[in-house]
Image (cartoon, rainbow, N blue to C red):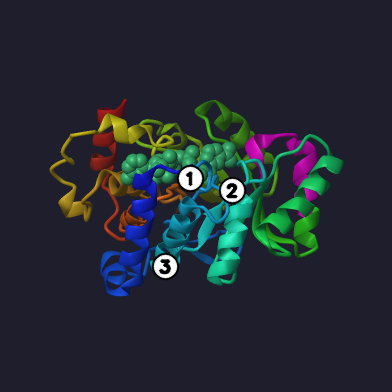
Amino acid sequence: MYARRDVLRAGAALGLLAASPWLHAAAPAGLLTRKVPSTGEALPVIGAGTSGSFEVQAGSAQYQQLKTVLKAFFEGGGRVIDTSPNYGGADSILGQLLEEGGWHRQCFIATKIAADSRAAAEAQWAGSLESLRTDKVDLLQIHNLRDWQTQLPYARELKQQGKTRYVGITHYLNSGQDEVARIVRSEPLDFIQINYSVNAPHAARELLPLCQDKGVAVLINRAFDDGRLFARVKDQALPGWAAEAGIDSWAQLFLKFAISHPAVTTVIPATSRPERQLDQLKAGHEPMLTQAQQQALIKQFA
Ligand SMILES: NC(=O)c1ccc[n+]([C@@H]2O[C@H](COP(=O)([O-])OP(=O)(O)OC[C@H]3O[C@@H](n4cnc5c(N)ncnc54)[C@H](OP(=O)(O)O)[C@@H]3O)[C@@H](O)[C@H]2O)c1
């Protein structure tokens, strides 16, 4: 069962987006890009996540709403979408949406291995390809460093076979970042994915500069602290300098904080709502935040 307001919201969004001029006016293409150090490939700085927001039933009102979210995302210049085989079926929903929308070629698919043995990983990988409706992905990451000594060599084998173009590792807590840094120092990696936000800026101290130094691309998860930052700014005005930084929403400000670190390749915020997707895309343009603006935010959200 779905709340009536959700159904209405999805219908309204679909109707609105069918009249494309509004979409183009609201989300100009030409997102800023950053290069993946290991290849020089340019990726847009605004990507998307799927945890929670894509955990819906195929064919439901929420599913139709996600189709509108992805239409806005791709028409606005987005490419990178992150998922995982253990996001409650989100990868399968993503695969179905990509197929229905004809977006597979545009999409840079990042997924994960989250398994405790080679045999389990092999079975999971076969399932991932089926769910995502593809025979290869762009980035295969070891989820939360789980069994990484076994899984990273397996991911590299898949890269050699042309099944993934890049390999990486992920974590989502400050407490995981020391181990992520140890692996960045000792293993060749194309990407890492970590948390970084106005209230969790820990990575800027060591890990992000290390990635710049080592030539490792960086995806940022939890830029909204899993949505909790919006409760903290409820009814609060944006900082006085926001307009000069090209920002007119808190979501844009949180995303711009993440991409203002030069080590960051792409931030991957999740949303199930088309109007939020359009808003997020607006963060992917110059100017970046100054050091003083970043420090003011860290102080405000400490
Ligand atoms: N270990 C890992 O590898 C790991 C861990 C965590 C996350 N990730 C990846 O990173 C992605 C992003 O992280 P996340 O999903 O945990 O957190 P997030 O992007 O910080 O926050 C997502 C949440 O914010 C809400 N939201 C978005 N825009 C909003 C707005 N304008 N106002 C109010 N709420 C808003 C979304 O709800 P609505 O859907 O209702 O908009 C969603 O619940 C994940 O989806 C996943 O792909 C990976």
Question: Local crowd at mark 3 within 10 Å, few (<14), some, or many (≥20)?
Answer: many
Q: Secondary structure beneath disc 1? A: loop
**Magenta span: chief secondary structure:** helix
Residue highlighted by disc 3: 77
Residue highlighted by disc 2: 90
Question: Local crowd at mark 2 within 10 Å, few (<14), some, or many (≥20)?
Answer: many
Label 2 residue near ligand 1, CB within 8 Å: yes
Tag in front: 2 or 3: 2
Q: Is residue 178 left or right of residue 301?
A: right
Residue 46 seen in the current view:
yes
Residue highlighted by disc 1: 53
- Report the Cα–Cα distance between label 1 and label 2: 8 Å
Q: Is residue 275 above or below residue 199?
A: below
Q: Say what amino acid the circle numbered 3 marks.
A: Gly
Q: How many labels sit on residues? A: 3
Label 1 residue near ligand 1, CB within 8 Å: yes
Tag in front: 1 or 3: 1
Q: Secondary structure beneath disc 2? A: helix
Q: Say what amino acid the circle numbered 1 marks.
A: Ser
Asked whether disc 1 touches disc 3, contact meaning CB atoms under 8 Å apart, the reply is no
Asked whether disc 1 touches disc 2, contact meaning CB atoms under 8 Å apart, the reply is yes
Start-end of magenta stretch: 142-156
Residue 17 location (% of width, % of height): 34, 67
